[in-house]
Image (tube, coloured by chain):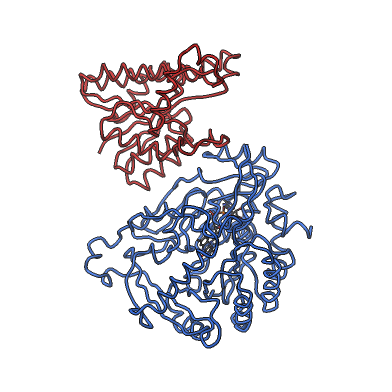
Amino acid sequence: MSTVLLLGATSDMAVAIARKMAAQGNNIQLASRNAARLAPLQSDLKVRYNIDCTVHEFDATDFNLHLSFFESLPVKPDITICVFGYMSDNKVAGQEWQESAKIINSNYTGAVSILNIVANYYAEKKSGVIVGVSSVAGERGRQSNYIYGSAKAGFTAYLSGLRNSMHQYGVNVITVLPGFVYTKMTADLKLPPLLTATPEVVADAVASAIKNKKNVIYVKWMWRWIMLTIKTIPEGFFKKLRL
Amino acid sequence: MKKKIANWGNYPVMESDEQLFSFDDQLQKLVKESDHFIPRGNGRCYGDASLSEQTISTLKYDKVLSFDTKNGVLECQSGLTFDKILEFIVPKGWFLPVTPGTKFITVGGAVGSDVHGKNHHVDGSFSNHIVEMELILSDGSTIICSSIQHADLFEATCGGMGLTGLIIRIKFRLKKIETSYIKQKQIKAQNLDEVIRLFDEYSHYTYSVAWIDCLKKGEHFGRSILILGEHAKVDELPEKFKIDPLKLPAKKSIPFPINLPSWVLNSFTVKLFNFLYYGKNFKREIKNVVSYEPFFYPLDAILNWNRGYGKKGFIQYQFVLPLESKQGLIEILHRISDAGLGSFLAVLKVFGKQESMISFPTEGYTLALDFPVRDGLFEFLDELDNIVLKYGGRLYMSKDARMKPEVLQAGYPRLNDFKKIVDQYNPKRKIRSVQSDRLLTPQL
Ligand SMILES: Cc1cc2nc3c(=O)[nH]c(=O)nc-3n(C[C@H](O)[C@H](O)[C@H](O)COP(=O)(O)OP(=O)(O)OC[C@H]3O[C@@H](n4cnc5c(N)ncnc54)[C@H](O)[C@@H]3O)c2cc1C
């Protein structure tokens, strides 16, 4: 039985991943800024899956506390899944630095800060799995979403380098690119069903990527080809598109 | 953004702004900021009870809060669905105290409609098993109620179609089981008289329901198959099941691909019934041991079977008549078979005694069948309503999308008490549905 640390545990995707990992018999550590919100999920996981589950206060953007957070965990996790992130209107973020900073810190800086700590621990132990949920938005910047996209691009590059450096220690690093996901955040959008995953499908993909020691996964296979196509569009043409 | 929603009958379809929430503070904010809404569970009621231009969906609010495995008491958030509950209670030797014919409903919806199952004559409806529940009222305040605490609110919430407030948390008692299997007995009845006699003869069985052929006339008018069941004890199981007596059924379901013209579904059910009824191996009575899944949820195996009634949707018509009104049942069945508008199969069940303010079940015969929406249907159903009322019966709001307010008023003698409580806890009817606008508002 392994212990799984879930960083950012209040999103629909996090709930689905927590349930999937718990269903496989893992103990779960739920970490989030608003720990009080996690009590129902904690009881849910314990009752439904007969596993142990603890709740921890964790703020991705409060970098100074990351080390003490990790050190205070009662049991060190075997698997760390980084699910937190923050997206908001690109226009607003373009006008207000506070908003941009929040996007960058939640999606990139905060993730680097905590995963450095986890990675150092895993390197020393010579075992462990790190999963980072990044985004296809990080594959190429688009006018509608480039502040979020650039932070995720940074995160994707970080995960790629981390994977490279952790390989020698037998630590597996997985990048998850979900594409569109049906969540409370996207409930108002009309999403193309073929390209959109439910949180449960994302959770299944994460669990199987861990089991099969994958490197980079697109939850819906089509995204790999879509992003490949988007990345090959010449910049001179791309910059004229309204994307 | 608005999206198109409908309940199980696909009638009516409407644009609605559906809001989701996961946490109490989010819900509080939604309720306070909304000018009106109706709580919505999994949309398995057939008509317009959980429809409105603004709905608050509980589907992401689905956590188990506690489970006392010794005494069989479960506490959960209202958006948790029965299929998920079965997955963890059955292996621990517990079962739902009452379940409708589908497991894809939320606990909140089970209370809102005060659902009944095949065991109504023995165990009553769902509300009979509630220890307590907590609601959020239209002003955003929360309140705990039970049969002894704020009993008026409790009574009006059970079967109250979401109109008193949004149920957030429910604590209810489960039923102890030794195995996940059902000892089933199926008996063929030649006609209506016989099936009614059989219901009586087998009333000691925990579960009973009959499939009845609505079209047959003459000597075989009302021919049926009575289905009886008991939770099997370990020593009643065939050897191969004894290894894992609380085993969960394998998950399998076939999606129903597209909307079909309604005769396709009807001819399928005709064939199915005839197969069971006339099948060579089918003696008058058969007994076997089956998993709970096919016994309680035969229709769930075909996801979206409701699409089989075509694009225009259908109405499920369900009424109950007092026991002394057998004549009414005969009259209605004749009308249905003469009109030829309805489905071929109907479900017949005998309810036990129940005193309640607004819940549907009351002692008597209840019949449910489907009518694809088409010209002339609503006029025909109005005529049926009159017969139902003439014999002292009533209709099930959870299936309804068209009844007139007078029909509700005449069928539910305590309707005015109900309205008073709704007005007290939900002033100005901030919580309202298309159905409540149709049925309750005109008399204000
Ligand atoms: C195949 C099939 C078989 C069925 N068999 C039976 C049967 O045997 N017996 C029976 O009784 N019913 C039966 N039903 C009907 C079904 O059980 C009820 O309509 C049930 O209420 C549906 O629950 P839901 O979660 O889908 O809620 P919805 O359909 O979304 O809502 C139903 C009602 O409950 C209210 N409600 C939902 N959640 C809350 C909440 N949290 N707080 C307050 N109010 C709420 C809604 O406002 C609405 O009035 C059947 C339905 C189907 C599709």
Question: As drawn, is B2 to the left or to the right of B183?
Answer: right
Q: Nearer the viewer, residue A216 or A74?
A: A216
Chain assigned red? A
Task: Name the spot of residue A60 as percent of width and height, x first.
Answer: 44, 22
What residue sits 26% from the left and 30% below the top? A213
Taking B316 as reference, is B430 left or right? right
Q: Say whether residue B116 is left or right of residue A152.
A: right
Residue B80, percent across and down? 48, 49
Along the viewing direction, whichever of A224 and A73 lies nearer the viewer: A224
Q: Residue furthest bottom?
A: B219
| Position of the C terminus of chain A by quadrant | top right
Image: B110 above or below B430: below
Find the residue positioned furthest to the top: A236
Q: Which residue is at the front of the view, B88 or A153?
A: A153
Q: Which hue belongs to chain B?
A: blue
Which image quadrant shows ligand 1?
bottom right
- How many numbered marks, from 0 up? 0
| Front residue of this view, candidates B64 and B334 | B334
Residue A228 lies in quadrant? top left
Q: Where residue A74 sits in the image (x, y, percent)? A: 31, 30
The residue positioned 71% from the left and 68% from the top of the image is B379
Image coordinates for residue A215, horizontal then vertical, percent: 29, 26
Residue at point 35%, 19% (across, down): A67
The quarter of the rendered structure image containing the N terminus of chain A is top left
